[in-house]
Each structure stands twice: as structure tokens, then as C-alpha cells.
Amino acid sequence: MKKIILSAFVVLGLTLTLTSCGPTQKDALKYNDEIVAVQKTLTPIHEAFINQLDGHNVDSLKMTHANFMASAKTSLEFCEKIQPFADKRDYLDASIEYFKVVKGLADNEGKSMVEIMSRDSAQISDADIAKVNEYAAKFDSEYEKVLAKVQTAQQAFAKEWKFDLIDKP
């Protein structure tokens, strides 16, 4: 009888040890989904701002820019509060860098473009248009670079935790 009780405690102990060894694939998926949700919340706001850069509706341009700046700040603050997963920071650090760059683009290049595009059309010179194009090129370049970096980190994270990345609409 003592052997059966001892065996039962050993099996129970091993079961508890194995199930509490650390995060699971399911935990990794949840972690990934949390970071992606922040990005997916910001993306339509970012796109709405980009769509208003034609300057046809100055009030809408200013509103979408203000919304983009506020949302970029909120997204960064939220992401900075996320803890590393399994004591690894690569994916989290890439995500934080992504949100820092997006916030910087909204605060700097975005703001500069809005200032120029908000002027009366008679006050916008060819040099101003060239400057807007320069800001837009930097905006796109920096965004694409940091997006590629976070996607690479996400792919490595998914590979490590053995799950597939699927883009859901």
C-alpha cells in the first residue's frame, strides 16, 4: 500500500513539474496576438492619416493627424508595459522600437507635412511641395524598415514556439 501511495505522489509530482516548466505554445500565441492587436488598432488610424495627406480637406487632415499622434503614443505606452516572454526580449524590443518609430514619424515628419499642407494653397511653394515629398519619402522609408524588423522578430518568435503566422482580416 505504501508503494502505491508513494508512486501516486511521484506521478503527481512529475505531472505538476512538467506542467509548470514554463510558458506553452498557447501562451506564445496569446502573447503574439496581444502585440499584433496593438498594431492592428493603430494601422487603420495611420492609414486614415496617410489618406488625408492630399490636402483637400485641411480640417480632416488635422484631425486624423491628431488621432494618429495620440494613438501612436498610446500604443507605445501599452507595448512598453508588456513583459518579456520566457525571459526573451527580441520580439518585444522590436515591437517597442516599431511603436517608437511610428510615434516619432507622427510627431515629426507627420507634423511637418500637416503644417505645410494646412496652409492656403496660394502660400504653398514648389519648395514646400518638395519638402512634403522629402518628409513623405523619409516617413515611408523609416516605416518600412522598422516594419520589416518587427516582422522578422515575429517570424523568429513563431518559429521558436512552433506556430504559424496567419494574417487575419
Image (cartoon, helix red, strand yellow):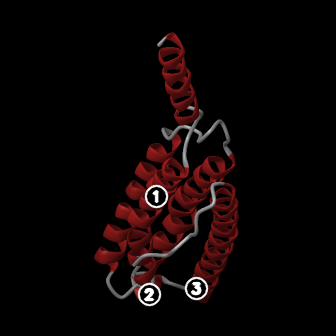
Q: Earlier in the sequence, mark 2 or mark 1?
A: 1
**For numbered disc 2, what is the local secondary structure?**
loop
Q: Which of marks 1 and 3 is nearer the N terminus?
A: 1
Q: Residue furthest top?
A: 2
Please provide percent x and percent y for residue 81. Answer: 48, 38
Q: Indicate the quadrant where residue 159 lies.
A: bottom right
Q: Mark 3 points at which residue?
A: 129
Q: Indicate the quadrant where residue 62 lies.
A: bottom left
Q: In this view, does 34 lie above or below 86?
A: below
**For numbered disc 3, what is the local secondary structure?**
helix
Q: Nearer the viewer, mark 2 or mark 1?
A: 1
Please provide percent x and percent y for residue 80. Answer: 52, 41
Do residues under tags 2 and 1 come within 8 Å of each other at their CB atoms? no
Q: Which of marks 1 and 3 is in front?
A: 1
Q: Quarter holding the C terminus?
A: bottom left
Q: Tell me the CA gap for discs 2 and 1.
A: 34 Å
Is 92 placed left or right of 52 in the picture? right
Q: Give the amino acid type for the residue marked by disc 2 in the picture.
A: Asp
Q: Name the residue under label 1.
A: 33
